[in-house]
Every structure is written in C-alpha cells, then in structure tokens.
Image (cartoon, rainbow, N blue to C red):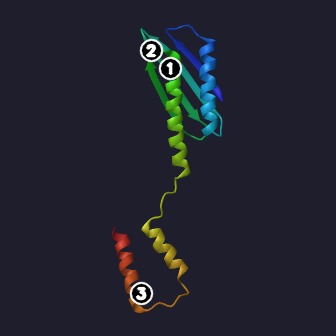
C-alpha cells in the first residue's frame, strides 16, 4: 500500500497522517488483495475541512471520495465510510458477475442433455414453439 498526503491551506500534521493511514488500511485489508495507491488531500476553507481520497486498486478499479465538515478527523471518518461502501459494492459486483442464465442458455442445455431420449412429434412442435418464443423475446 502506498499513501501520499497533500495539505492545502493548512500545516502538515503527522498525527492526521497516521490517523488517516491506519483507518484506511483497516478497511482496505478487508476488500483489496493487490497493491493499492491512495492519495489523500486535506484542505481548509474557513470553517470547512475537506478530505479528498483518490484510490487506485490493483484489481483495476479507481474511486474518488471526498467529504466536508467542520472537523478534519470527522471528514476522514466519513471518507473512510464512503470508501468502504464503494469497495463493498465493487466486491459484490465481482462476486456475482455471472448473473442468471438466460432462456437461450437453458434451451441450449436442454438440446445437449436430451439427445439420446426418444421424442414424438408433439414434443418437437412444443420445442420449436418455445425456441421461436425465445428467439423473438
């Protein structure tokens, strides 16, 4: 894991760096398996403290997360929560990427599995009607 920190309109803080790094590492270890890069930008504009996170995962995905509130540590907590949500969604997408089988796949499986079974003319007519229905819809 590689971390990069930027501070805009504020002094750099080692305590803030350590806090953000440990929080992010805890979440990343749950979801990421390959090396990642994180770039955190901390900015202050009057009373608004903004934390922005650019996350590039080794699995080929990237996220941009930011949050603004009156406390920088609170902003970091919210950014980590948003990152966790996005990582969880990404993991679910990867986990269930195949989805359900389509009607065409089911018809193809039926063709292959019933080659040795005797079929009469009524069954053939039903099969052809079902095949036309699948190809039209």
Which numbered circle lies on residue 70?
A: 2
The CA distance from mark 2 to mark 3 is: 72 Å
Q: The residue tagged with tag 1: helix, strand or loop?
A: helix
113 shown above or below 60: below
91 w.r.t. 78: above or below? below
Q: What residue is disc 1 on? A: 74
- Asked whether, in this view, residue 14 is left or right of residue 110, the answer is right
Please name which of the two marks, 1 or 3, marks the residue nearer to the observer. Answer: 1
Q: Nearer the viewer, residue 58 or 10?
A: 10
Mark 1 surroundings within 10 Å by alpha-carbon count, few (fewer than 14), some (14 through 19), many (20 or more): some
**Residue 29 x, y percent position in the rendering:** 64, 35
Residue 4 drawn at (x, y percent): 60, 21
Q: Are marks 1 and 2 in contact (CB under 8 Å)?
A: yes
Q: From the viewer's perspective, is 132 left or right of 114?
A: left
* Residue at x 46%, y 74% (from the top left corner): 107
Q: Which mark is residue 123?
A: 3
């Amino acid at each position: 894991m590689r971390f990069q920190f930027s501070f805009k309109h504020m002094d750099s803080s080692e305590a803030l760096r350590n806090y953000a790094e440990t929080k992010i590492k805890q979440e990343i270890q749950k979801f990421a398996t390959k090396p990642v890069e994180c770039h955190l930008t901390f900015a202050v504009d009057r009373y608004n403290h903004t934390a922005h996170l650019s996350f590039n995962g080794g699995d080929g995905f990237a996220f941009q997360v930011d949050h603004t509130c009156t406390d920088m540590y609170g902003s970091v907590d919210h950014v980590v929560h948003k990152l966790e949500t996005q990582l969880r969604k990404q993991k679910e997408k990867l986990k269930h990427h195949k989805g359900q089988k389509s009607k065409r796949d089911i018809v193809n499986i039926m063709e292959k599995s019933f080659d040795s079974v005797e079929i009469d003319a009524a069954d053939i007519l039903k099969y052809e009607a079902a095949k036309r229905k699948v190809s039209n819809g």
